Amino acid sequence: MNCKFKKFPGRILEMEIKSSPEEIVPKSGAVNIEPIAVVDKFSSFYFHNSRIERNEGDVYTVTCKKDKWMELRIKETLKGFRLTFKIGEEDGIFGLGEEVGPLNKRGRVYEMYNIDEPDHSPSKTRLYSSFPIFTILSPKKSIGVFLDHPGYSRIDICHSEEDRIIIDIEGRAFKLYLQGDTPAAIAANFVALTGKPVLLPVWMLGYQQSRWSYPDEKTVLTVAQEFRNRAIPCDVLYLDIDYMEHFKVFTWDRERFPNPEALLSKLRDMGFKVITIVDPGVKVEEGYKIYEEGKKAGYFCVNSKGEPFEAYVWPGKSHFPDFYNARVRKWWGEKVSEFKSVGVAGVWNDMNEPSIFFTPELIEEIKDTVNNLSPDQGMIADFAINQIPVEKRYKDHGKSFFHRDEEGKVFSNRQIHNVYGFNMTRATYEGLMSDNKNDRPVIITRSAYPGIQRYGILWTGDNASLWEQLYQEIQMLQSLAMVGVNFTGSDVGGFGGDCNGELLVRWTQFGAFQPFFRNHTAIGTKNQEPWAFGEKYEAIIKKFIELRYSLLPYIYSSLKEANDTGQTIVSPLLYRWPEDRRTYEADDEYLFGPSLLVAPVYKANSRGRTVYLPGNKWMHFFTKKMYEPGYHYIEAPLDSLPLFIAENSLVSMTEPMQHVEGAIWKDLKIMGFVTSSASICIYEDDGTSFKYVEKRFSRKRVEIWKTENKLLARIHPEAGELVTSQRTINFEIFDGAYIHTGEFTDRGEGGVVELERVTKNQY
Ligand code: MIG
């Protein structure tokens, strides 16, 4: 075994392990900073609160504050390597991003191999993305692990052996990153290692409406008009695959969308942005430009004979651009920019695992099997037929096609499978950035790998309109935040199957506290727009979409904070209270931004739920009732949501609008719960451009503090050269006994105001 060690900022140890010095580590592209030192004779390495030591026979031990904590063994196997972490009985394991199941990953097997999996049932071991990043946590110590390997791996977390994490890696070389800090710092360090998240335009924080598919111009305009007629805020509409001509990427079906430019501009006037789907599969069709160009230049993945690899997806027989190659990425990026220039606001990359419906060989194999079966084989026959597509999808397709990087190195897809979607997103991002440096690019991807946050955002794919999956998405949102995917969300209302009024209400209440807030549903399902289930539900849904818009100053400031520091908008409770073991299991609630705790209702026919409130006192956002830390049953009729403000924290709000143009707020309201002091920052800019880089932004700090019986508010400009116009800032602060209100005229220079005690809080 050949081992090399390097040190990265944040006290991260990189271990490069190869079976022999000649092996090459396939580039994943995840890490995009340079090491600060080569660790020559590695015998021990200090993390923040722990230390790793190398012993004989590739055994490493981790000690924390002088106690031996865990052990890592690295061994070569037939197919590659096996890593075994021996851990403590009570340690929790968190992370892995897009996986079904609880926040604490103990007791299950997960596979890192991206796949188009529309069935998100609890038995699934993989979905569209791979994030081999996890944190091992026990109340006073934590270790962060990132296995940077774009090929297949299988992570058994205390499933076959209670006290062991066993990772089987397919391949002869990989990198492993280890660090020891608090769970929140570990996550931020990994973001520093793999890149800062993109700063999205503010309208991406608005409500978004989709369906597979709004089939023509007329339908899209009707949906848009419906939103405005009903005064339900909405910023973005989506065009799914049916806008294309025969599913040919970068085309429009001119019968159903005769003049896309005019349509998009009309929608823009109504305050809507339009995002279109872009799939990787390029239809094999003579005379079709993308196909011809790609074929001529050799831009497609190839089969073992070196010919373009052929498989069937939406357009029928298709080729797959080889995004692993920089030249192909550049070409694709130009195509996307050109396509976008008719007025498309953002790009939605789907099917990029890549998803393959079938190949000609697969059909032949199934035919042969069917021919050779006799009906009385019963169960065996059924099994034999089904087994073929399953094997192909999960393993064999990846072996049957190849990538060639820009230096001519060849890799089978199976070796680098997990970065196909990552590189497609990268191609798109780089194309949009080099074309138009004015607008912040918006790219949504289904398939991803660590580092994806540098290029785009993720949504969680084809969930179903089921209560169980609503709960699962609450867990997944947090697991994704823990691996650096700060901006994500599930299809609100559920994708597969029919939704109903109550489920849509509860999912929208949760959705309002997902960074990405989009309602989407599959072809053939019931309509799922906010008004689809009647007035009673529509009114509640509208109320929560409006709540989302009123929280935009708070959410936009958190978004910028995430972009600056790598801290996330969504965080599991264990980030702030890692020493409280109860937070390990409280995975049906989370923190949203610095001040709010959200506990969505995710059970049918419920009118309340139990909420765990950690650490300090909390104030109910709607009833203003105060709670001591601990477990509480919180009433939540259909039009309410258990939402809390932490003691000594603030939230910035504004009047909701129909759609959001810029992130400079006409009016502001500061709401909070302050028993001693609290502060919050309000970040503002034009909301769409990169001018903030040249200081065209305003950052103000609002502080509230209590002196005897008085509450004082101070506003002061902290950074930026943007001057906001005169406006009123209103205050409504609860001090544990009384509500205090006040008003401040913000002319940009800051000041102090004394708040007035108005009421004893009745609750
Ligand atoms: O094979 O474009 O996850 O959001 O509506 C299904 C049609 C392809 C899967 C995506 C979904 C999208 C659908 N797509």
Image (spheres, rainbow, N blue to C red):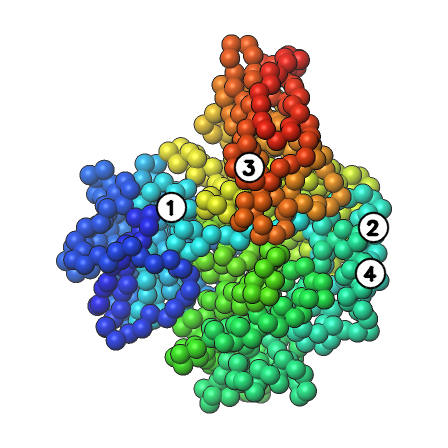
Q: Is residue 41 left or right of residue 443?
A: left
Please tell me which residue is depicted at 39% across the width and 54% down the height of the picture.
Answer: 193
| Residue type for callout 2 | Glu
| Residue type for callout 4 | Thr
Q: CA distance from mark 3 to mark 4?
A: 42 Å
1 or 3: tag closer to the N-terminus: 1
Label 1: state its secondary structure: helix
Q: CA distance from mark 2 to mark 1?
A: 45 Å
Quickly name the residue at label 4: 219
The answer, for residue 632, to whether it is visible in the render is: no
Q: CA distance from mark 4 to mark 2?
A: 10 Å
- 686 versus 744 height, above or below: below
Q: CA distance from mark 3 to mark 2?
A: 37 Å
Label 4: state its secondary structure: helix
Quickly name the residue at label 2: 226
In the image shown, does 509 or 254 lie closer to the viewer?
Answer: 254
| Residue type for callout 1 | Ile
Q: Residue furthest top?
A: 708
3 or 4: tag closer to the N-terminus: 4
- 737 versus 157 height, above or below: above
Residue labelled 2 has its Cβ within 8 Å of some atom of ligand 1: no
